[in-house]
Amino acid sequence: MLRQVKRVVRYGFIGASVVGTGLSLHNANYDWSGIGIVRFTRSAVALVEIASLYQRELYFRSWDKSSKEYREQRSIVHQKAANRLLELCCLNRGVYVKVGQHIGALEYLLPIEYVNTMKILHSQAPANSLEEIYKVIRQDLRRDPSELFLTFDPEPLGAASLAQVHRATLKNGAEVAVKVQHHYVRGNAKVDTVTMEYCIKIMGWLFPECRFQWLVDESKKNLPIELDFLHEGKNVEKVRQQFKNVKWLKVPKIYWELSTDRVLVMEYLEGGQVTDLNYMKKHNIDPFEVSNKLGALYSKMIFLNGYVHSDPHPGNILVHKNKKGGTDIVLLDHGLYATLSNRFKYEYANLWLSILRVDRKAMRAHAYNLGIKGDLYGVFACMVTGRPWESIMQGIAKKKPDAYEKELLLTGGALVIPDIAEILEKVDRQMLLVLKTNDLIRGIEATIKTENRMTAFWVMSKCCVKSVRNEEMSQAESYWRKFAIALRASWSLFKINFFYLCLGFKQGCLFATMKQLVI
């Protein structure tokens, strides 16, 4: 089998090289590392090495997949393969880093060795030189940076897969953040996407349980959008309008006259990374308040607005103590938003409510409406909640996550990877970015140690009830039907608030609990 793979890779390599070399050389500004043929070769070599690794060290014999020996060997092989994939992402940069970041966000959905290894790309993506940044600014704004900026920090505030951000001062003294797209990304995007699709098809043929075509499809759909910084600016304006009454949410003002599709100049906003506990301690910021506000923000985005910031990794969320002593959430990098249909919001909200009620029949029905058929609804519920089935059946609103749960997810999750792969292939496409977003938020909560907070599902439950009410009201025709829907929703909201207030009183934290009523 491996011999056949090598033959396919060799023929594909020859064909791609003939077509792509000239164009890639021009697009890469004669940087050999950016030439399509070089990038394709790296990918092909990495593919063969990873495939050989699995064949040589894992699939060379039959295993008892429930044995400790198999789990240990599988983990070793996964880690070696993940390290090789990380090396490829860092060498090829651009789209490869973007896909690596996506993998690093899918905790509980992919082998943990891949997830933990790729997480490094969220904060340590390769950066370009200052001269390369200046070159893009000159090309797009038709002026030298010295004519536009009083100061320009040569050290980037952060480097991501598609761009990097520098702090600067405008001639009028305004502090700004300047986001500049990597010069090589746009020219390589199409070749890189085709190459990755080719590699994933080969891996799927080699290992049928590894079905990641959904990842390629999402990248092909979202990448052109993320490469247009003017589109990102419009996302900023839209989310600011949607949350104009939420005083603790800060999004940067856009300087449109200095922005293009590759350069985005925006207001500089102070803050520390949402996972920086030392920063929070120094500025007297309560991690539980941060988690509650993040939970409220994303619940409203998903279940009510249907417009979801889909890249909430720690580098894109800052926390800041405002002048009044409250905590602000600063939301950055608005390049990727998921737009959810009313019907999707209705089904997803009902799925969550059925999980919280431990209603298996309703879980199955709403999972089916989201594309998941048969008994896979149980695995799907685990993916949505990040909790094992055993805890779901006990009631996740009552049972706090613990070390045993995490171990159960990590060991048991590996056994259902084929089921997870099937779900990701079949589920409503709107669900994919929501799953990624859920995992990133859960990762933040785990890092700042707030995943056990009592009110984790309070605001979300209320948003789910309102989402269901809104959709049913839009379909109702008679006044009495609308009245009945509104009455039922009001009763549900009262019960939810009463339950959590009683829980707060019982645990001696009623005042802290009451704060959730106004978030």
Image (spheres, rainbow, N blue to C red):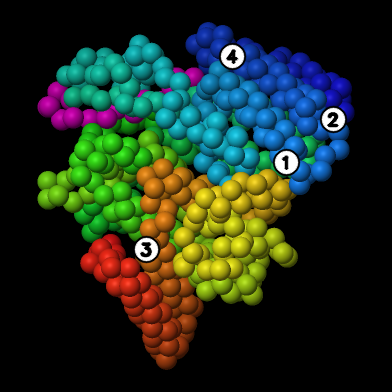
- List x then y, in percent, for residue 376: 69, 60
Disc 3 and disc 4: Cα gap in Å?
52 Å
- What's the amino acid at mark 1? Lys
Q: Residue furthest bottom?
A: 480
Q: Are marks 1 and 3 in contact (CB under 8 Å)?
A: no
**Badge 1: few (under 14), some or many (20 or more) residues near its Cα, within 10 Å?**
few
For marks 1 and 3 on the same chain, the one whose residue lies earlier in the sequence: 1
Mark 2 or 4, which is nearer the eye? 2
Quadrant location, the N terminus: top right
Mark 3 or 4, which is nearer the eye? 3
Pointer 3 residue: 455
Mark yes or no: residue 264 visible.
yes
User: What are the residue bounds of the magenta stretch?
Assistant: 170-184
Q: Is residue 50 above or below residue 23?
A: below
Pointer 4 residue: 35
Pointer 1 residue: 68
